[in-house]
Amino acid sequence: MADTATKKKHTVLGIVGDSATGKTTLTKGIADILGPDRVTTICTDDYHRYDRVERSENGLSALDPRCNYIDIMEQHVKQISEGKPILRPVYSHHDGTLERPIYEEPKEFIVFEGLLGFTTRSLRDLFDVKVFLEPDEDLRIRWKVDRDTGKRGYSKEEVMKSLKKRESDSPEFIMPQRTFADIVVQFYPPEENAEESGAHLNVRHTLRPTLPHPDLSPILQSGVQNGLHLELVRDADGKPVDVLEIPGNITDDSAGKLEDLIWSLLPEAQELRANVGKFTDGSNAPHMSHPLALTQLLIAFHMVKAQVGVHAI
């Protein structure tokens, strides 16, 4: 039976994934749903121990925990989740330097997104909801090239060199965190269009029983699912999980029905309804994706339920 305890003052979401897996885009949409004025967003990349030049000199990448102040990150997640302000470090992705820290106060919802948020048990225990992003690897590389050349001033050759340098770090330091996530999100191109990298990507949600996920059967059994699919399978670690597939070609009508169903399960948050699923590509042109919007909404669902105590079973 669900515990109807007092509403939490601060609810904490952790989003982890390799570089260019869509963490910032996902976070922005979740914040748009919950209300930007009610969300504190912190990038865990700000806790880098070394700047870009120093990392190059010592031969370590930003994916290596030794290049990050994991202990300070733990302290700050704990402090801000308890309602205490923190002096957050700042790392500039533009020029790779460490900048003046920022005074950060907690709001109702707190999102930590970055590379190493689930590295230690102490960190993992502080999150109410944990999400791991695992897009198709070829897709991630395309996203990284587009982002780093379009927004961070790199050449394509520099991006590919960086990827080559990091290729052993991701399986060693990033991927092991996957097993601790409540939800694993994987965007991937449809078979008929392997070059798709935006609005029409499919998405697969691996839903672990560590959270009570919303009952989507009214849509999935209604005959209007338009490619939506949910099945019980075994994950890579052999444990049973539900897998929800949302196709990139889902119709406006079917996506709208699924959104309406999820919102109907959030009577305590009807005022939060927002138009999400927006993203920009390498040219900074705006686009809208139903699979992205539904992903953002499903995660926001868990944040609201965690806040009101429904996740305390």
Image (spheres, grey):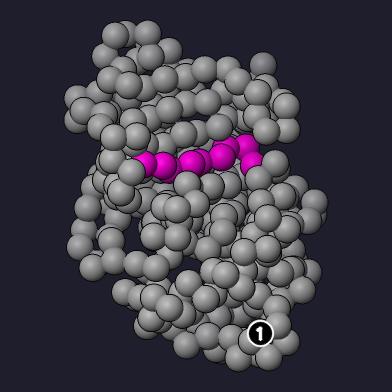
Relative to 114, does residue 271 appear above or below in the rendering? above
Q: Which residue is mark 1?
A: 55
Residue 94, percent from left and from top: 44, 83
* Residue 45, image x, y percentages: 59, 71
Q: How would you classify the magenta stretch by its main secondary structure? A: strand
Residue shown at 21% from the left, 58% from the top:
286
The residue lying toward the viewer, choosing from 305 and 224, is: 224
Q: Is residue 154 left or right of residue 123?
A: left
User: Image quarter for residue 254?
Assistant: top left
Q: Is residue 204 above or below residue 177?
A: above
Please tell me whether residue 185 belongs to the stretch shown in magenta. Answer: yes
In the image, 226: left or right of 136? Answer: left
Which quarter of the rendered picture does the N terminus lie within? Answer: top right
Q: Which residues are magenta?
A: 181-189
Question: Residue 71 is drawn in which quadrant?
Answer: bottom right
Q: Position of residue 14 (x, y in %)?
A: 60, 52
Q: What x and y, as percent, mark residue 127?
A: 66, 48
| Structural crowding at the residue carrying mark 1, measured as other residues with C-alpha within 10 Å and reported as few (<14), some (14–19) or many (≥20) | some
Q: For the C terminus, which image quadrant?
A: top right
Q: Amino acid at mark 1?
A: Arg
Residue at 71 percent across and 59 percent down: it is 173
Rendered residue at 50%/33% (across/down): 205
- Residue 269 highlighted magenta (yes or no): no
Task: Kindly tell me whether residue 258 is visible in this rendering.
Answer: yes
> Circle 1 — which element?
helix
What residue is at 43 percent from the left and 13 percent from the top?
217
Query: Which of the 4 image quadrants contains residue 187?
Result: top left
